[in-house]
Image (spheres, grey):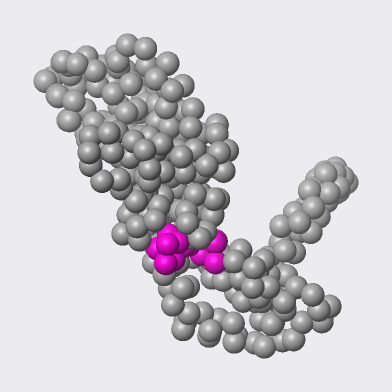
Amino acid sequence: MFNTYRRGLFITAFLAAPVTLYLVYVISPYIQAFYIATTDWRGVSATPNFIGLDNFVRLFSDGIFWKAVTHNAALLVLLPLFTIVIALFFAFLLNVGSGGRGVAGVPGSKVYRVVFFFPQVLAVTVVAVLFQQVFRPDDSGMLNGPLMALGLSPISFLSDPGIAFWSVLGVMVWQAVGFYVVLFSAGLASIPRDMFEAAAIDGAGRVSLFFRITLPLLWDTVQVAWVYLGILALDVFAIVWVMTDQQGGPDYSTTVMATEIYRNAFEYFRFGYASALGVVMFFFTIGFAILSLRLSRRERIEY
């Protein structure tokens, strides 16, 4: 009994500091944000006025908010879909699906993994500034320069409302895909090579190897990747803010919830309204993670 008490006391003492820090620096800001969302605080007064759910009611009639939600929802579907499909394709080629019925991957696969992963080590703001130059609408742009040299009209990647969103999505996929190539490659490396060799001997082609062996055995990794990419899609800020015209333009064609939170808080000084946006974004993110994990749950395959 005494030993149990001492063990409990030791565990409590050991966890007291990290739990206290977590409550103060993680849980407490959430609680403060929920409270501020029910006020009209503008960031200067010491005693904000309580207005209840007025900020949340106002959200439903805010057209810019609904544009931001639409863009986040589109990213929520398209970013994980494109990134995972491309990453699985390259990881499969690097580890399994080289020419013929071989299962050894392409030569120099380790070098390719480093090349694919390189965009991941760049800061997001660096990527945004880099692609500002790539998308320049004159002959100094990496994409428009060759087009203009051929006598074609330049493409307004960041100033055309119909193209700007897809340009942002392309940049996000370009930066994210390398990490998931490495992640899926690590998952493939853990699958016994005998499975691929036996399937190849039985006459399975690359498509069959992918859909009948690779994808089922990597399903848990794909599920985690989908959740991470979905959270990234909901939390995107720096690329949109730095790279696009008018920080979410043109005409709010690339704005997302995170940019509207920043704009309302630090440009319009509507901290209460910005906190309400943050609360909505918080529940969107939590809801997406729970829904994704539940819908993608399946029987675990042991090997």
**Closer to us: 140 or 258:** 140
Q: Is residue 205 above or below residue 169?
A: above
Residue 158 in the image: state x and y as whole percent.
40, 52
Residue 173 visible to an observer of this rendering: no
- Picture residue at 78% right of the left edge, 48% below the top: 18
Image quarter of residue 28: bottom right
Q: How many marks?
A: 0
257 in magenta? yes
Residue 28 visible to an observer of this rendering: yes
Asked whether, in this view, residue 272 is left or right of residue 191, the answer is right
Q: Quadrant of the C terminus?
A: top left
Q: Is residue 49 above or below residue 99?
A: below
Instruction: Name the residue at the top extreme.
Output: 107
Magenta extent: 249-260
Q: Is residue 41 above or below residue 231?
A: below
171 in magenta? no
- Picture residue at 14% right of the left edge, 24% below the top: 204
Residue 87 in the image: state x and y as whole percent.
35, 34
**Closer to us: 141 or 87:** 141
**Closer to us: 255 or 114:** 255
Asked whether, in this view, residue 213 is left or right of residue 26, the answer is left
Q: Is residue 102 above or below residue 152?
A: above
Asked whether, in this view, residue 150 is left or right of residue 237, the answer is left
**Closer to us: 118 or 31:** 118
Image quarter of residue 75: bottom left
Q: Main secondary structure of the magenta part?
A: loop
Asked whether, in this view, residue 149 is left or right of residue 168, the answer is left
Residue 83 in the image: state x and y as whole percent.
36, 42
- Picture residue at 75% right of the left edge, 73% below the top: 43
Residue 110 in the image: state x and y as whole percent.
42, 16
